[in-house]
Amino acid sequence: MQWYDWILISISIGIIILCLLQGGKSEGASGAITGGGLNVFVKTKERGAEKVVSILTLIAVAIFFLVTLIIELQ
């Protein structure tokens, strides 16, 4: 394995961990059956730790994408 394989593996593990840390943004199938999703047009903003994890996930995915493109273009 090359050095860039280790970088991609570590970024991938980081993305998986960050995605698991994020809370659910919808009620899922149970909300559809019971009618729990009636607040469709309510504005909900991420705050605090949720926002930080969301931004870190976006940054990690962007870095993963850029590293993959750089490796493929070499």
Image (tube, helix red, strand yellow):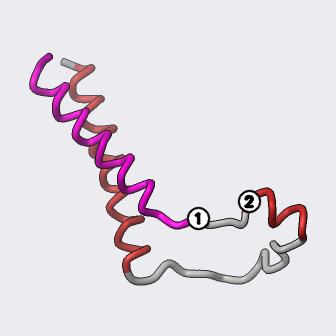
Residue 2 among magenta residues: yes
Tell me if 11 is positioned left or right of 38 in this view: left
Residue 50, percent across and down?
Answer: 43, 74
> Could you tell me what secondary structure mostly forms the magenta stretch?
helix
Q: Secondary structure at mark 2?
A: helix
Kind of residue at badge 2: Gly
Range of residues picked out in magenta = 1-23
Which of the image's four quarters has the N terminus? top left
Kind of residue at badge 1: Gly
Task: Categorize mark 1 by other alpha carbons within 10 Å: few (<14), some (14-19), many (20+).
Answer: few
Mark 2 touching mark 1, by CB under 8 A? Answer: yes
Q: Quadrant of residue 29?
A: bottom right
Task: Categorize mark 2 by other alpha carbons within 10 Å: few (<14), some (14-19), many (20+).
Answer: few
Q: Residue at x 41, y 65 (%)?
A: 54
Residue 10, percent across and down?
Answer: 22, 39
Residue 28, percent across and down?
Answer: 73, 59
Residue 55 is marked as none
Q: Residue at x 44, y 55 (%)?
A: 20
Residue 8, percent across and down?
Answer: 24, 33
Q: Residue at x 66, y 82 (%)?
A: 43
Residue 24 is marked as 1
Residue at the farthest left position: 3
Q: Residue at x 55, y 81 (%)?
A: 45
Q: In this view of the protein, which residue sits in the foreground, 34 or 39?
A: 34
Residue 47 among magenta residues: no
Q: Secondary structure at mark 1?
A: loop
Residue 28 is marked as 2
Mark 2–mark 1 Cα distance, whole angstroms, equals 9 Å
Work out whether 35 lies above or below 72: below
Tell me if 33 is positioned left or right of 61 in this view: right
